Image (spheres, helix red, strand yellow):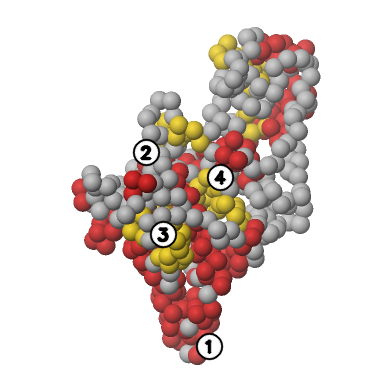
Amino acid sequence: MLRWSAIVLAVVILGTAGAGYLYYQHLNANIKKDDLNIGDEKDRAAESKANAAGQTPLNILLIGSDARDSEENQKLGGAKDTFNTAPRADVQMLLHLSADRSNMSVVSMPRDTLVDIPKCTDPDTGKVYGALTSTITNDSLGRGGPGCTVATWEKLTDIHIDHFMMIDFAGVVSMADAIGGVPVCVDANIYSKSSDGHGSGLKLKEGTTYVKGVQALQWLRTRYGFEDNTDIARAKAQHQYMNAMVRQLRENATLGNPGKLRRLAETATSALTVDEGLGSVAKLYDLSKELKKVPTKRITMTTMPWQYSSSSSGRVVPKPGDADKLFRLVRDDIALDGKDKKKSADTPASADPAAADDRIAVQVQNGTGSSTRAALTGRAHAVAELLVGKGFTEAVADSSVNSGVEKTVIRYPSADLEGDAQRVAKALGVPLSSVKKSTDVSGVTLVVGADWRSGTTYTAPAEDDKTPSSAQVINGSDKKQCMHVNPNYTW
């Protein structure tokens, strides 16, 4: 869409330079901007590393806001009692563009996911929102803006986010109208409306329908009527829509109409809120050229692996092991469609010099438990003694038992301790890729994982780069996707 918008601009500028410049400035003025990350700088994930060719991946957080901050948004969103209240990030998708631009991965986080939200500072008012634990993820948007949602994702995934793009109800409707319709499929007649008022109002016949405008918004918001009436099914429907939209935009020759292109330019720039790094038509156009390089068949839609929370009914939490693995694949720029032949790049040695072994304080924690096995008693003490025997005389065992971790990991809180943490890893034979910066620790901390329950020699498990089946992979070129309709919502 942005590429086509730029073509319109080029035509206008070539036709009449003065008017073209004014129109370009007009479109730039349409774009709303906000801060990228309003969490503490120390909580930021490290920037993505370039590949051997010097190319760098891009991570863009896509946010759908449920704000009822205008008459139009209120009408579209309903819930009159929530007018002008804090917006929520009801749709959150991390778009990862590979360094070589050969593939693209999208990871959705269910709206009902419980996460830790970091401290955020509103850039407009200066209000400070304190950190929260086990809080529903969509609350992050109301704590100073999209920059807090970005900070929350970085804290959870340790993935550096380069940009965000946010759209509200009215923006979805206007964009869907400008595109001219997106094909979606249901396996039965659906009417998303229950006797007690639940549902988006979506009403479609069995088969494929081209939805646009309000109907497109209803599709994207539908939970009651798809599969088991959960946010997980809604994310699946959103993936189907996005894949179909990409195919439609690439295949629809009617968008060569200059008048339609101009309306699309107006709509695209008016519908979006972005960070300063994307805050002009030129920057958005540059991004669109990068996205265009990825063939549809190399676009992969996934949902963050999840499980139901044991403490909060109806909420979900990241699935141990599987969610971490999916985040690692994105961090390491490994394609989620399994078609990458490359392996994870080795982590470079830190530029921070390590202290002498006997001056490095190391806390050792026991994380050998798992969902099927209890933590091994005394394991932290045994590994602490091993370190002392290797000259790390300030190594001590933590008597508490850490929540189980799949792989042994060494964490450090700040850049000045990275060299020390890597030195501990080298002494134990732990790969540098398992040395992680974390604000959850106050010093170099070794968590002995379920992969090292015995012995004095650590053997790193072979890396499995296959996307977990629990991520519900959908390929961008799959035209056979069709949402299953809940039998209670048919007509």
Q: Position of residue 59 (x, y in %)?
A: 57, 52
Residue at (56% x, 15% y) in the render: 401
Distance CA(mark 1)–CA(mark 3) = 48 Å
Residue at the spot of label 3: 206
Secondary element under disc 1, as helix, strand or loop, is helix
Quarter of the image holding residue 476? bottom right
Say which amino acid is labelled 4: Gln
Give whichever of discs 4 and 1 has the lower sequence position: 1
What residue appears at the point 45 percent right and 43 percent down from the top-left corner? 232
Mark 3 surroundings: few (<14), some (14-19) or many (≥20) residues within 10 A = some
x, y (%) of residue 116? 45, 34
Q: Secondary structure at mark 4?
A: loop
| Residue type beneath disc 2 | Tyr
- Classify mark 1: residues with Cα within 10 Å, few (<14), some (14-19) or many (20+): few
Q: Secondary structure at mark 2?
A: strand
CB atoms at circles 3 and 4 under 8 Å apart?
no
Instruction: State which tag comes first along the sequence, 4 or 2.
Output: 2
Q: Is residue 275 visible?
A: no
Q: Which residue is mark 2?
A: 129
Q: Earlier in the sequence, mark 1 or mark 3?
A: 1
* Residues at discs 2 and 3 in contact (Cβ within 8 Å): no
Q: In the drawing, does residue 183 fall left or right of residue 205?
A: right
Instruction: Tell me the quarter of the picture where residue 351 sits.
Output: top right
Foreground: 131 or 416?
131
Residue 452 found in image quarter: top right
- Label 4, on which residue? 472
Q: Is residue 485 above or below residue 458?
A: below
Task: Single out the mark in the foreground, 2 or 3.
Answer: 3
Q: Nearer the viewer, mark 1 or mark 3?
A: 3
Question: Considering only order in the chain, which callout, 1 or 2, is on the residue closer to the N terminus?
Answer: 1
Q: Say which residue label 1 marks.
A: 14
